[in-house]
Image: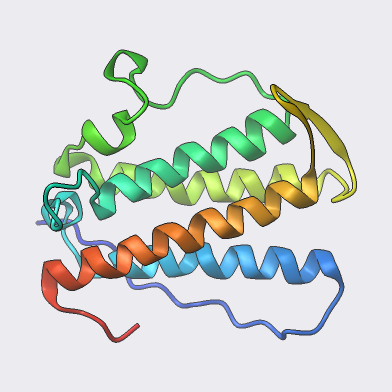
Amino acid sequence: MTWTAPEVSLPQFEPVGDERTLLEARLAWRRAVLLDKCAGLTGEQLAERSVPPSNLSLLGLVRHMAKVERGWFREFIGGEELEPMYDPALGPDADFEDLDPARAQADYARLVEECRLAEAALATISLDEVLATGSGQMSVRAVVGHMISEYAQHIGHADLLRECIDGRTDR
């Protein structure tokens, strides 16, 4: 049996509430939209680089966002020291290059799990907390804003990739 990415229900939320509630809801919605762009596709379709000469694929975006979630929330905010998610010998684009359609289900599950772990890390800290980066300082609020923007950018890519794969433009 061939695995296909599951259908996703986009979360519903009110556009009224305190800042944390609104930011977390917007981030959760963007996460769900990216997964929705994958819904119903097989591992082979997810790995398809449908906009040559770009190396982008939906599976690459899933893998990339798992790495980004892990880096910002578990490593930066949570202070965890973790092994690299992908083989560093393959370079900084390993998440886009080292694709295996047979691993699509595991890669998808990894993103879902990294999002869950990111939510847990975020729940333990104030948005006002300021953390040191290699180039200065950054608030947790800025990290959440950055992640919303990161997803928005890649959802745009996902729209185009999905349309090229099967013509879907309805969402």
Taking the image as shown, residue 3 lies to the left or right of residue 30, namely: left
Q: Which corner quadrant holds the N terminus?
A: bottom left
Taking the image as shown, residue 18 lies to the left or right of residue 98, namely: right
Q: Nearer the viewer, residue 78 or 1?
A: 78
Taking the image as shown, residue 160 lies to the left or right of residue 32, namely: left
Q: Residue at x 20, y 55 (%)?
A: 46
Q: How many marks?
A: 0
Q: Position of residue 106 (x, y in %)?
A: 31, 42
Q: Residue 167 lies in what quarter of the image?
A: bottom left
Q: Position of residue 159 (x, y in %)?
A: 30, 70
Depicted 96 relative to depicted 147: above or below: above
Taking the image as shown, residue 153 lies to the left or right of residue 14, namely: left
Q: Residue at x 17, y 52 (%)?
A: 43
Q: Position of residue 53 (x, y in %)?
A: 13, 47
Q: Nearer the viewer, residue 44 or 19?
A: 19
Q: Nearer the viewer, residue 13 or 51?
A: 51
Depicted 89 relative to depicted 75: above or below: above
Q: Residue 19 lies in what quarter of the image?
A: bottom right
Q: Which corner quadrant holds the C terminus?
A: bottom left
Q: Residue at x 68, y 56 (%)?
A: 145
**Colour approach in the figure:** rainbow
Q: Residue at x 40, y 64 (%)?
A: 155
Depicted 95 relative to depicted 23: above or below: above
